[in-house]
Amino acid sequence: MFPHLHVASAYSLRYGSAFPRDLVGRAAGHGMDVLALTDRDGLYGAVKHVQACADAGIAPVVGVDLALGPPAGPAPRGGPAPSGDDRVTVLARSGGWARLCRLTTAAHHAGERGEPRVTRSMIAPHADGLVVLLGPRSDVGRAMAVRQDERARALLAAWRAEVPGVVVEVVDQYGYRDAALATRMLALAGSLGVPAVLTNAVRHLDPGDYRVGNVLDAARKLVPLHPRHLEQAASHAYLKSGAEMELMAARVCGGDRDRARGLLAATRKVAERCVLDPLEVLALRSGDPGRLNLPEPGEDPVPLLRRRCEDGLPARGLERSTEARDRLAAELQIIERKQLSGYFTTVADITDMIREMGVRCAIRGSGAGSLVNYLIGIGEVNPLDHGLLMERFLSEGRKGLPDIDVDVESARRLDCYRAILGRYGESRVACVSMMETYRARSAIRDVGAAMGLPPHEVDAIAKAFPHIRARQIRTALSDLPELRSSGLNDRALQTVFLLAEKLDGLPRHIALHPCGVLVGNAGLRDVTPVERSLLDFPMSQFDKEDVEEAGLLKLDVLGVRMQSAIAYALDEIRRVDGVDVDVDRGVPRDDAPTYDMICTGRTLGCFQIESPGQRELVAKLEPRTIHDLIVDISLFRPGPVNSDMVTPYLESRHGWREATYPHPSLRGPLAETHGVVVFHEQVLRVVDTMTGCGLSRAEQIRRDLGTPEGRARVQVWWENEVLPEFDRETTDHAWKVLDAFGSFGFCKAHAAAFALPTYQSAWLKRHHTAAFFAGVLTHDPGMYPARVILDDARRCGVTVLPLDVNHSGATWQVEPLPPPAPRDAPGAVGGLPRMTALPANAGTRGVSGAVENPPQSGAAPANPGTPQVPAGGGDQGGIDDLIDRMGAGYGLRVPFSSVKGISEAEVARMVAGRPYTSLADFWERARPSRPVAERIVQVGGLDALYGLRPGGPRWRPGELTRRDLIAQIGALDRASSPSVQIPMGFSERIEPGELPEMTEAEAVQAELEILGMDVSHHVIAFHGELLDAIGVVRANELLTMRNGAEILVAGVKVATQTPAVRSGQRVVFATLDDSTGPIDLTFFESVQGRCAATVFGSWLMVAKGVVRRVGARAVSLRALDCWNLVELDEAWRTGGLAQVRAMLGDPRQDAGAVGGRRIRYGNGYTISPYADLGGAPGMHQPPSKLWHSSPGSSGPLDPPRPRPTMDLTTPRDPRPRPARDPRRT
Amino acid sequence: MSRIYGDPIEVWTRDAEPARFVWRDRLYVVRRILDHWVTSREWWKISENDPGERRFWRVEAGAGKEIGTYELRFDTASGGWLMLRAWD
């Protein structure tokens, strides 16, 4: 039987197209009993290949196809350099896996990153474990191809001298002269007595796949798709059958049957020499813990771990608890049987080390369910407090390896990696990698580049698509209304999309996994090849599944921005208030004011509970304890939502419905959640209770539920195993719950670990509001842009302080404010001064965003037909007032780092040089670049120094302005050039110019452009009059709206999400911010036809929606329609209110419904193919033009011109209801 | 010297290789296959479907006593043969 010895899979990046499992399947179909995988540049697919072979009963051979490089040292430039394309294939001999790993690692360390190279002399030391194939692409083959036969002979002789296991590889892919070359190479091998083998240099599974290969070649080489750049006969590089290979053998042997037979026999012989024992690669499969690559703690780990646990009992106050002792004994028994003691002590050493570095570190995931982890200080969650189970983490029956996950401050994650590397050494530590695969956007980018489209066009096209699979591109173009109307359906782009779809799902590049770190012993590099990551960390070529199969233990060290934000907030509290807060152990976990705040849903910025859906849920659930938060976090997942757990839970929790249990014996596991299954742990307990199978087995059952095949198996198992005391109804009911829960649900240990930072962040928000926001703004942990967080800070009473060269720091800093002064304290922009640059008739609502200017009571009710409903309970209003004031007395200072284009060095110089006495002084000592200096002036960084007050009392000639300072920067810049001599003192004097100061509108526009956020005023404030005119309801008035009322709202779009929902629709959730709070809108598919393009494509929006009251404090809107506010504003200025009303009433062109087949799961759950795609496409940043500017205006620094005035005679109509769209009744 | 033709011809094959062909009303018998190769096509300009490949044979063939070298092309998509070149 013919063995293929040269086979590239899709893990030959941008080269191969078939996955190892499919190749193995085809080989088995051809009746082959040996198959090699020899990917280019690495062993990325090796584990998957060996797994597939072992499963299919095929003997695996593994090798790597490497580029031949110049000998170490500087590459010889000039002269007849060896072609950079020369390649050889290196196979591991039986028992030579470690050699192959080491050689691959060496090749990656010899070449440039991502371009491994080997030389003969690098292979030589490993030669006893390897076989080298010299084919048509090798130096020998290339010399033969250009008829340098003597050189080829010399090269082959040199190879044989250094690497005894060298073999000539002949290939015939039916290209022009392929066969002739093969025949001559065969002759060369014969004349030197070197064995020759036949391969097909396989790249694909089927002949037709060569087209994917063509696209990959073009993408890899960045050349257009043109025959000149492509291989001629690529269609023959597929996995041919034995018969086809015999034909080929006959061809290259010129029809000589004996020689052909000899060639095939030689091939077979080499293959047999290279067959690997699968367990050499797949250590986990052996079931022998001795084969795992375990860390070496230096002493016998078993007593070491026992001792540390014993010490932990009194430290945690558990020395008298029998429950704890029993649990500890049970856990240790499992750990010791699996020989994992050393792993636990090593992880504990690492977490100790991280904390000693002053880095916050918290356990996450199922590891929180282990008492051992708590006792030896890896985590702060006591599993006994929350009923967490060890079995979810590590159990007798579970074959896989445990992995402990810890969260560290995101800003310090790489420091943690370096510390781990420093302690254990590069030979024992490596990061885990992951394969990034082609999806729609990346495929369009690569193909677009290969087709030679201009980069900015490619970028725009790619970004128009949501994060979908590449093969969905053309379907999405016709399914999604916002793409249908985008003009992308152009014929000229059809080829790009067609080619991009062909790349679907193929690995594209390798990247550092966000958290996995392997910690092993000195033999680590015998079992995994290691290359260098972009940041120069040693990185295994295996992904997280592969490393487990290979028997490598890992620790997940995940960088969590919220941990950085908390650490930053704690530092600010210490710096500003001189208080040391121990948020981990020194803060009560039942603080009533914190829970009061959470219950109001004012949780923007808090970990896990800031999304629109979560704000709605916490307001309905009203958590009062950590356990409630654990439930809340677990409920807000597809699983519980899918199986409709939320409503029954809430009803039972609030006592509106009695908790029911499928069977009295299930009260135990389910009582904590009022009879509703919320946690994985409960699934385990239910299964165990009803079948008596034990928790370990129950955990396996739960895992099996995750796949369709597993689900079918479990269903049968369930029918057989349920104990007789449960009747039919109970059995069916319980099955339904388990089935719906599937594997979607949530691990309680994970939720418990999450609940802690959730609570901590909420506690900080409640009690150290300004410091909390400083942390959030500096480390950006959440889903909202900075301007939303800043606005929330304002609403919580924190004063936002503008950039000031004498006060700003490198990052957001808290400044205590002097005791309450008169309202318009200079410098404090939190209390917004009245806007004067608005159209002269600016309404009373102009600045309703101001914290200290609560919305005026004169605000017209938007819909007089709606009776005013009092907001919540009376005390709720009190809580709101309290929250409005909780940050009072502190300011937040915009930092230098917020300025667009500023460098770290500039920031450092600016901070170090404070204080400055003048602009010239700042220029001189902080040495900013001219554009940065100008930007700092534009956003008011020198206002305080020069007493400038844009937007204050009207400017009069002779007063200094920001424009004058900018002119001065120009002068300073010119004076800095060495050729110009300026008299001393010149630079200190600034003459007021003749141009007026910037208006507020111009100032805010500059802030958005330069800082990315509106500091002095909320952008929506400039539209106040229009919004009043059309009767827009503000966010803080929503609670007064009647359920079912149809209202208009407006704001800056701050978030859009398309999560998976029960109905299987694509639902778009959008959050608007109108300076008085967030407004949550839901766009169902029925309205997306006319709304999708606007929702995704605009930044300032007006929307019409129906009020949905979902709880005492929770309101959301079902959107009916929406408009781009900038367009309405334009219409208002040109055509007046009548035109705006016409636009609001005008049913617009409907781009059609959302298409696409629902994805249906076995348990009846359906989702839209476009749900839950991560970041939404479209506008997330303010566009360059936010509001109308007069013709001729070329930028914010131009003198303001008279704006078109409104018709002042039109009385303000409080009822501008747009005509009802007749189609929607 | 070779001349380029491009005439459609009729070919009989044996074991998937050309054995006899008729060109310009004369029957040629293939005596020896000198070379055989294939090229793929610019499929992205044609269609999404596999456009197949073009198979080339360079053969020594004779009509009667005259022996010459000929290059034949078979297009797998159209199933048609062409006489590409002939050497005197």
Image: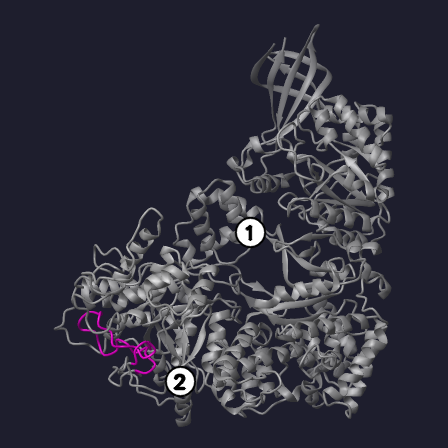
Chain under disc 2: A
Give the residue displayed 62% in from the left and 73% down from the top: A359
Q: Is residue A932 left or right of residue A1058?
A: left
Q: Which residue in the rendered view is the most extreme toward the front? A: A984
Horizontal and vertical percent for residue A1208?
Answer: 14, 72
Q: Is residue A869 above or below residue A1197?
A: below
Q: Are marks 2 and 1 in contact (CB under 8 Å)?
A: no
The residue at which mark 2 appears reads as A889
Amino acid found under the numbered disc labelled 2: Gly
Q: Is residue A1079 visible?
A: no
**CA–CA distance in space, label 2 to label 1:** 55 Å
The residue at which mark 1 appears reads as A471
Q: Is A648 part of what is drawn in magenta?
A: no
Horizontal and vertical percent for residue A644?
Answer: 57, 78
Q: Is A851 part of what is drawn in magenta?
A: yes
Q: Which segment is the magenta one?
A: A825-853
- The crowd level at tag 2 (other Cα within 10 Å; few <14, some 14-19, many 20+) is some
